[in-house]
């Protein structure tokens, strides 16, 4: 094959790339696609209640939920509950991530630490984290410490597993480049291992954060007088389904916002990735 | 002066990969090692690089014994092995971390210019073609100005056209600072184009079987009769090196016969 015929193969490909660029309107329309399903369902339910097909007592229509939401927000109650819940998640997340990162990096990097520590941690991992609650209540009392600890335990395991697995699976060939440039110890970790594990690390952070939100509800179910989880329990005991749904919506919003923040903050560090991207 | 003195390598499972390799390579010399697969070519190179430690013998560079990667020895692998999270420029400057930023930038820019990739400085490794990536790897290895450059089948994953192009390019770059070059390859033509000396290795355990001086005038014409003659010699030596069944006497006879019947 000659050089000339090779260039003719290349040219149509660049043309395809140009035409494959998204049309102008679809860039703005695409995010809207995600709203079609929930909005249709909400409007449908609203209409069903309004036209008397359902009394909407147990499943309040969106307008009632919205009203409850606004009422809770106007009294400042919602913000207060949301704030305390956020604080718990962040405290537990920070603790769990720190411990998970350090232990995961150690067990990934050093075979001896792995053999010493990992079997115990894997055994602890197989205990459903909620099972710790009675013990944590005895140890740390019913206030913040026990709640934050429970969340930290929930966050710890995905982060620990993620970091350890990522360090273990760093390409030997890349590590060898570091060795050829006489890197060792901390320099090797900083310049080779850390950047190499970053994509996996971000995934485990997001998994950890998701579990953090899960465990904050569990923690707040067990004797809290504040927090979005308390709003849930309170709504159940006083028969206020709208309050329950309002709290659930608040969880959804906060969970989505924190996850998006995490993704947005980490994106600039991952621009180099050679990944499969959907159109 | 790079000195390899009776170097042997025995793996923990008892396999003897290298046995009694002795070799002196002078400054600016280009030595190419060829041999069948599993004859210990790469093992030898890794021992010189300090990535593996020889079980017996000693590798020395100007009086230093090599037991770990050395600042005066650079290595280029079969794959480019660029760090995907660094831009092309940062990859080239990877070994210059100790230099001040302005100086580092200057040397990286000069090196990228030299390998013809100045316009790719800000690109990510994933955006490069195989040949471009390997050129960045060459720039990365050369920019700390090593005294010895080791190349482990650096062009074997490239197409024939790119490979010939990079061979010429490598010689061009070599002429800048004239480091000692030790290259491992399984491409006989590549060996003849580049080498001052060709070493044919023999497997189980890996030993130097034959040394062929390649003193064709440079630049070397791949189509010339002289080139073809050296090629036949190397191929014959390779053929003999892999033929373990015949005795030493028979081998010399076969060599003469083989040299004529190869083509």
Image: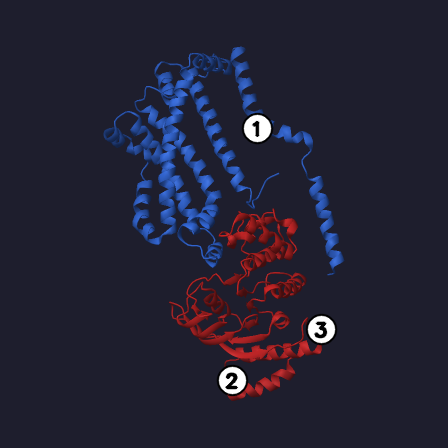
Chain colours: A blue, B red
> Which of pointers 3 and 2 lies earlier in the amino acid sequence?
3
Q: In the displayed orientation, state which residue is furthest to the left.
A: A138
Nearest to the observer: residue B79 or residue A50:
B79
Asked if labels 2 and 1 share a chain, the reply is no
Q: Nearer the viewer, mark 3 or mark 2?
A: 3
**Would you identify the image quadrant in which residue A96 lies?**
top left
**Residue displayed at 35% across by 40% down:** A99
**Residue displayed at 33% across by 41% down:** A125
> Local crowd at mark 3 within 10 Å, few (<14), some, or many (≥20)?
few
Q: Any mark on residue B19, and which?
A: none
Task: Check the residue under mark 1 and report the chain it is in.
Answer: A
**Residue displayed at 43% across by 63% down:** B68
Q: How many marks?
A: 3
**Would you identify the image quadrant in which residue A122 lies?**
top left
Q: Quick check: can you spot residue A15?
A: yes
Nearest to the observer: residue B140 or residue B14:
B140
* Residue receiving disc 1: A34
* Residue receiving disc 3: B223
Task: Check the residue under mark 2 and report the chain it is in.
Answer: B
Instruction: Determine whether, in the image, residue B204 is placed left or right of residue A155.
Output: right
- Locate the C terminus of chain A by quadrant: top right
Q: Secondary structure at mark 2?
A: loop
Q: Quick check: can you spot residue A214?
A: no
Instruction: Determine whether, in the image, residue B107 is placed left or right of residue B57.
Output: right
Rendered position, B42 above or below A29: below
């Amino acid at each position: 094959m000659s050089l000339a015929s090779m260039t003719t193969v290349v040219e149509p490909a660049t043309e395809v790339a140009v035409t494959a660029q998204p049309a102008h309107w679809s860039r703005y329309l695409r995010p809207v696609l995600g709203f079609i399903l929930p909005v249709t369902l909400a409007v449908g339910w609203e209409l069903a209640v309004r036209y008397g097909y359902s009394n909407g007592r147990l499943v309040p229509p969106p307008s009632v939920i919205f009203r409850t939401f606004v009422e809770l927000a106007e009294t400042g109650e919602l913000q207060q509950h949301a704030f305390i819940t956020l604080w718990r998640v962040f405290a537990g997340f920070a603790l769990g991530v720190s411990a998970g990162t350090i232990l995961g990096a150690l067990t990934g990097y050093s075979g001896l630490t792995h053999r010493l520590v990992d079997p115990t941690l894997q055994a602890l991992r197989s205990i459903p984290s909620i099972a710790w609650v009675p013990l944590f209540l005895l140890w740390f009392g019913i206030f913040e410490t026990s709640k934050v600890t429970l969340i930290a335990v929930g966050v710890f395991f995905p982060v620990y597993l993620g970091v350890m697995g990522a360090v273990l699976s760093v390409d030997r060939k890349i590590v060898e480049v570091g060795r050829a440039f006489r890197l060792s110890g901390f320099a090797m970790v900083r310049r080779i291992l850390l950047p190499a594990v970053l994509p996996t690390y971000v995934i485990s952070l997001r998994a950890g954060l998701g579990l953090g939100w899960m465990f904050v509800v569990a923690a707040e179910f067990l004797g809290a007088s504040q927090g979005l989880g308390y709003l849930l329990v309170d709504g159940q005991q006083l028969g206020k389904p709208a309050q329950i749904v309002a709290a659930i919506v608040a969880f959804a919003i906060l969970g989505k916002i924190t996850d998006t923040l995490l993704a947005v903050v980490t994106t600039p560090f991952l621009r180099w990735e050679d990944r499969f991207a959907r159109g | 002066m790079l000195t390899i003195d009776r170097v042997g390598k025995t793996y923990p499972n008892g396999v003897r990969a290298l046995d009694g390799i002795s070799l002196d390579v002078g400054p600016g010399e280009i030595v190419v090692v060829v041999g069948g697969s599993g004859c210990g070519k790469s093992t030898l190179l890794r021992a010189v690089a300090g990535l593996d430690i020889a079980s017996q013998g000693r590798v020395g560079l100007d009086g230093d014994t090599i037991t770990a990667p050395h600042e005066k020895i650079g290595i280029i692998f079969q794959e480019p092995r660029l760090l995907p999270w660094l831009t092309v420029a940062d990859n080239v400057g990877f070994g210059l971390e100790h230099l001040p930023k302005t100086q580092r930038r200057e040397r990286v820019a000069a090196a990228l210019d030299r390998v013809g990739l100045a316009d790719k400085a800000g690109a990510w490794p994933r955006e490069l073609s195989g040949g471009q990536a390997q050129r960045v790897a060459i720039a990365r290895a050369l920019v700390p100005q090593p005294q010895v450059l080791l190349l482990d089948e650096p062009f074997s994953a490239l197409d024939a056209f790119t490979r010939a192009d990079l061979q010429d390019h490598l010689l061009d770059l070599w002429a800048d600072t004239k480091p000692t070059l030790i290259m491992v390859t399984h491409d006989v033509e590549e060996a003849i184009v580049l080498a001052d000396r060709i070493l044919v290795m023999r497997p189980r355990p890996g030993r130097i079987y034959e040394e062929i001086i390649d003193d064709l005038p440079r630049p070397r014409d791949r189509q010339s009769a002289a080139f073809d003659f050296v090629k036949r010699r190397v191929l014959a030596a390779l053929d003999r090196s892999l033929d373990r069944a015949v005795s030493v006497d028979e081998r010399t006879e076969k060599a003469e016969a083989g040299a004529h019947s190869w083509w």
